Amino acid sequence: MAQDIRDGRRRVIVLGTGGTIAGRAAAPGDNIGYAAGQVGVSDLLSGIEAPDGISLLAEQVAQIDSKDMTSVVWRELALRCAHWLAEPDVAGIVITHGTDTLEETAFFLQSVLSPHKPVVLTCAMRPATALAPDGPQNVRDALVVAAMPGAHGVVAVCAGTVHSAFDVRKVHTYRLDAFDSGDAGPLGYVEEGVVRLHRSWPGAAADVASGLFERMIEARTWPRVEILVSHAEARGSIVDSLLQERRLGAAEPVQGLVLAATGNGTLHHALEEAALRAQSAGVAVVRATRCAQGRILPKAGEAESIPSVGALTPVKARIALMLELLGSPSTA
């Protein structure tokens, strides 16, 4: 249920989904042995001052550890975002989220919404019960971005840095500044309540088909897309097992594969051969690089037997392929 925090002329909606930012530990000095998703989003806003001319409204959409994120939660989150973005007095949305899958949720929401207002995901690396929690400052910075005139698209704000949904990725296991934007670099920074931009707000994804939001809502099931990593001594047996499941009429047969390739999109020959068999059997297959930096560059004059996804990380490539497959006969 939504709860008003204060009155004002423009609103920022704060949607809670759980995560470390809402976590509790038995001892204040324990920053890693906590239970995520324990503190309600309204409580997270307690004591946080809204930007000038802004009122806050909090709504709990989910209360989970983000490692356990599901398409059910994504669907509900997209619906709630669409609802609030359509309200003329809403300046933007802040989503409190766990760090583990924040980059996936951000990319998903950007892909299905391409919002003309800001949707800002924020998080924490320490639980709410920590001696020095980082969540309150991250929320405050996110509110500043969500209330900023002219801001639009889905972004992530953590440790004073603003990242585009297309580029953001978690790169550290425990450091407070745990996110990075790869080669592209951050969009900007929040400095003492002021946003300093380095580049433009994220626009619509060029490859998002029209009507994607509607297809997402109408689909009975979402396509199953798996990620497989190419490595030394990789085998094709997992791919063949997934194909066998399809032949035996599995309830949720695999419809897509993302291959996390080495270097500039290279694959172990055994995995590549199995992937080509899957492709021939009707499974959609793409390549992403497992490298933390860079993108897959096409080789001049060489046709791609397995298409690449350029700069997308494997987890974002999975979402892109899943959305591409929405509306196919097995999901419609």
Image: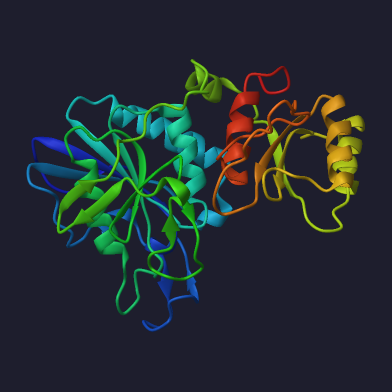
Q: Quadrant of residue 275?
A: top right
Q: Quadrant of residue 8?
A: top left
Looking at the rendered structure, the number of numbered marks drawn on it comes to 0
Q: Is residue 207 left or right of residue 189?
A: right
Counting from the top left corner in percent of width and height, residue 118 is at: 29, 36
Counting from the top left corner in percent of width and height, residue 316 is at: 56, 41
Q: Is residue 48 left or right of residue 279?
A: left
Q: Nearer the viewer, residue 229 or 246?
A: 229
Q: Quadrant of residue 244?
A: top right
Counting from the top left corner in percent of width and height, residue 166 is at: 46, 39
Q: How is the image coloured?
A: rainbow
Q: Nearer the viewer, residue 254 or 42?
A: 254
Classify 76 as above or below 160: above
**Is residue 4 at least partly visible in the picture?**
no
The quarter of the picture where the N terminus appears is: top left
The quarter of the picture where the C terminus appears is: top right
Classify 99 as above or below 220: below
Classify 26 as above or below 43: below
User: Which residue is drawn at the image coordinates 68% and 29% (left, top)?
Assistant: 300
User: Which residue is drawn at the image coordinates 25% and 37% (left, top)?
Assistant: 92
Counting from the top left corner in percent of width and height, residue 42 is at: 27, 54
**Farthest residue, direction front:** 300
**Is residue 33 at least partly visible in the picture?**
yes
